[in-house]
Image (cartoon, rainbow, N blue to C red):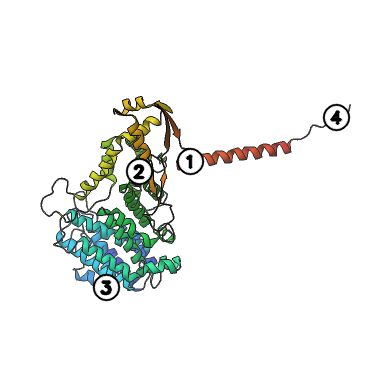
Amino acid sequence: MTTNPDIESDIPHEVYSFFRALNKAVDSWDTSLLHELYENQFPGLTQNFYMAGPGQFRPWPSLRIKAVADCFKNRTAEQLYSFLRLKHLFTDRAVSPNDARSSWDTFNNLFNALPSGSCDVPNWLLWDIFDEFLFQMTVVYQKRFTGRVGWSVNEGMQLMERVVAESGIEEAIQSENLDEITKPGARHAQWMCGFFGIVTIAKVNVLLGDYMGALSALKPLDVYGRGRQILLVVAPAYVSLLYHMGFSYLMLRRYADASRVFRLSLTTKVSSRKFSEKMQFDCAYMHVISCILGGMQPDNLSWLVEPRKLSGFEDEKELLSAGDEERFREVFDRCSPKFLAIPPITTIMYKGTDGKELQARLFRRAVKQQEDIIKLRGFFGVYQTTTTELVKTVLDVDDGHVPLFAMRLRSRQLVHDGSSADLLSGSYAVRSAIDYTVKGENIDVVQKSSYRTTESKYFMRINNLRRRQRHFENQRQERRQVQPISVAK
């Protein structure tokens, strides 16, 4: 029997089978089946039945249809389906206030049910629930629905704080076996909800421009210690967290920490998550920006970039290294988060009051303050000896010593030790790849080899290993040489 997909109540039997299987998986705490339904069957059915042509959109059936609602005997399974339906619905630009109101109610119900132990949910689905919660919040604020549909940042933060408080995750990280937290079990969903709740609180703080608050919120997770082992189980959560951590460091002008965190996100393997792969590409650009502003040498990231995008990436990297202010702005606008403006503007968008524009101003100010220093570093990268007179000419300044003093001052920054749970801690250190000495009017440039790029360090190791291998091979050949036998005449 054929069905008409343009009629919402005309539902294929494969979709009904999906509904019943979802109810069964939740009711029996079958996380393997739930993972299969979410990762494979739901995208497949969406592709087959609920993907319309260009300019069209076809939603999944509503729970208001009695035949659909009758498939769900379990209340939590019903709410999970509502989440899946709204996740698909929010990919459409024509989201209505009623959709936003249903979304808020669904998340409220889920965040009350999941931490209470009503069922168990696989880690990746659980993370996507929290990630989608924040995404739909940004959509609601961008469309100016908030206030009329239940969504607000204050209520969202209170909801997350309640989930964290009820989960007991802070005590569990310190005392429980980490496998007990990440693997299916009686308290698995409760603990992981608390873990992802803390990550979401930190991300909201980033979207509000509270970067110190974001890094402070992550202290209970110990992201460089025990928390990292949990994050590695859910790669998309790890990439998202590192992106927001790195961005916080960038806006706090802790460029060495920002470049290290962005670089760490690039080494995390993420499969079947296009959004996470895009975020990693944004991290690549942010890594380059952090290194340039911090006076460090960016790593060679050609292995990450697709061949068709590599030339464009390298071109933009060169323009950024040259201090092109417009290029800095374009990359920031493209790779920065979707900021929230509080309170929301309901009718008229006033120039300069949008959250993203306000943060872009702060970033451009930091770039503008280093405009001469970036050019000076590029100049020093070419010439090993120069004079203050040439510095005056290149930078068009009256005193050639002032940029040198500014460059030396900027090279010292607060750097985290890479292990402490307190992400705001650190000690002052110099991470600049270039230093100099001044004698009278003469300047001698010093390349600091102790802060080589990651690629150059591995290149040196490989060369050392090759030299050792050649040394041992030569010794073996000498031992194997056969002594000539003298023949008696």
In this rendering, the count of numbered labels is: 4
How far is disc 2 from disc 3 in space, using C-alphas? 48 Å
Which percent across, then down, holds residue 175?
44, 69
Residue at 32% in and 25% down: 393
Residue type at numbered disc 1: Ser
Query: In what element is the residue under mark 3?
Result: helix
Q: Which mark is residue 450?
A: 1
**In this view, 462 is above or below 134:** above
Snapshot quadrant of residue 23:
bottom left
Query: In what element is the residue under mark 4?
Result: loop
- Tag 2 residue: 290
Q: Residue lying at the far front in this picture: please name it.
A: 440
Label whose residue precedes the other's in the sequence (4 or 3): 3
Query: In what element is the residue under mark 1?
Result: helix
Q: Are marks 2 and 3 in contact (CB under 8 Å)?
A: no
Residue type at numbered disc 3: Arg
Label whose residue precedes the other's in the sequence (2 or 1): 2
Residue type at numbered disc 4: Val
Residue type at numbered disc 2: Ser
Give the quadrant of the N terminus: bottom left
Q: Which mark is residue 130?
A: none
Which percent across, then down, holds residue 450?
48, 40
- Tag 4 residue: 487
